[in-house]
Amino acid sequence: MRLATWNVNSIRARVGRIVDFAVREDVDVLAMQEIKCKPEQFPYAEFEAAGYTVEAHGLSQWNGVAIASREPLEDVVTAFPGMPGFEKGHNGPGAAQEARAMGATVGGVRVWSLYVPNGRSLDDPHYLYKLDWLEALRGYTQETLAAQPDLALALTGDFNIAPTDADNGDPTVVEGVTTHVSPPERAAFQALLDAGLTDTVRPLVPEGYTYWDYKQLRFPRNQGLRIDFILGSHAFANAVAGAAIHRNERKGDAPSDHVPVVVDLDLTGPADDDVPMIFG
DNA sequence: ATGACTTGCTCAGCAAGA
């Protein structure tokens, strides 16, 4: 199974190139973020004509997540347990949740399409919201894997964190000045890994960014960020046989500011660490 | 230069992104 995640920055503005990519790259499951529309506005027909079914979740022109799949999507949900909400002037308990998460089961994998809050600035309420959101996601991950240690769980999407300095090539993104690289954000990302997840792409794609700002020639100068990830549980990570970051999708007419991240899964065989080494 | 793109909403200017 080939699984991809892509912050599309409006599905309606570029549905053609997104479906073209999925077909050309033989993607089986595509998790999308920032669809920027409500479900009734989603261009389902283009996906269906290419052999995909789609589940979409959006509440307004902001945020929005979706999953397209060749095989049926089961047990679809639009929040993880404990996911915080955020409302202007009312961002404590009980605030309405935004359209930032979708979970679905396909091909034996529990897949999440996640759009972590941006944070805006270090002194903005959205920054604390971002940290709360990530902590709740860690809690969900830890509890899920405690109950089902062998579950193939994948957290994919736009995490809005550059975990290390190697993931930050944008000179305006600076620790102590902007979001995405602050120690608390990086600690929140590390806590997800400590809860039992692995960055499944980095070992196979040791360098390269997934996002470049539209402004100031960031892409031609290759001053980007690596903020889009496919994090997997032990069972998922063991099945990953290949990975790619499709930098070329930042080129051409009207690209998203993010590019797709892809993994190939070999779910047919046993986990590699269960197989005795009988050669060599 | 308190901006520099791009999108959606609504119709010229704002909100939001990272």
Image (cartoon, grey):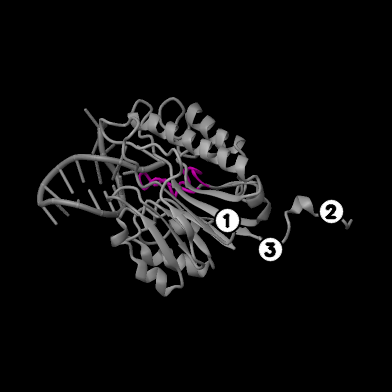
- Callout 1: helix, strand or loop? strand
In magenta, the rendered stretch is: A210-229
Residue A109, label in figure: 1
Q: Earlier in the sequence, mark 3 or mark 1?
A: 1
Could you tell me if the residues under marks 3 and 1 are in contact, i.e. CB atoms within 8 Å?
A: no
Residue type beneath disc 2: Pro
Is residue A23 among the parts visible in the rendering?
Answer: yes
State the residue at coordinates (65%, 47%). Answer: A203
Q: Residue furthest front?
A: A147
How many numbered circles are shown?
3
Estimate the x, y position of residue A206 in percent, counting from the top left. 62, 47
Give me the C-alpha separation between circle 3 and circle 2: 17 Å
Could you tell me if the residues under marks 2 and 1 are in contact, i.e. CB atoms within 8 Å?
A: no
Q: Check disc 2 and report the residue beneath it.
A: A276
Residue A268, label in figure: 3
Residue placed most toward the observer, A155 or A243: A155
Q: Earlier in the sequence, mark 2 or mark 1?
A: 1
State the residue at coordinates (72%, 54%). Answer: A271
State the residue at coordinates (46%, 28%). Answer: A175
Residue type beneath disc 3: Thr
Estimate the x, y position of residue A63 in percent, counting from the top left. 34, 48
Residue placed most toward the observer, A97 or A18: A97
Give me the C-alpha separation between circle 2 and circle 1: 25 Å
Question: 10 Å neighbourhood of mark 3: few (<14), some, or many (≥20)?
Answer: few
- What chain does mark 3 sit on? A
Residue placed most toward the observer, A114 or A226: A114
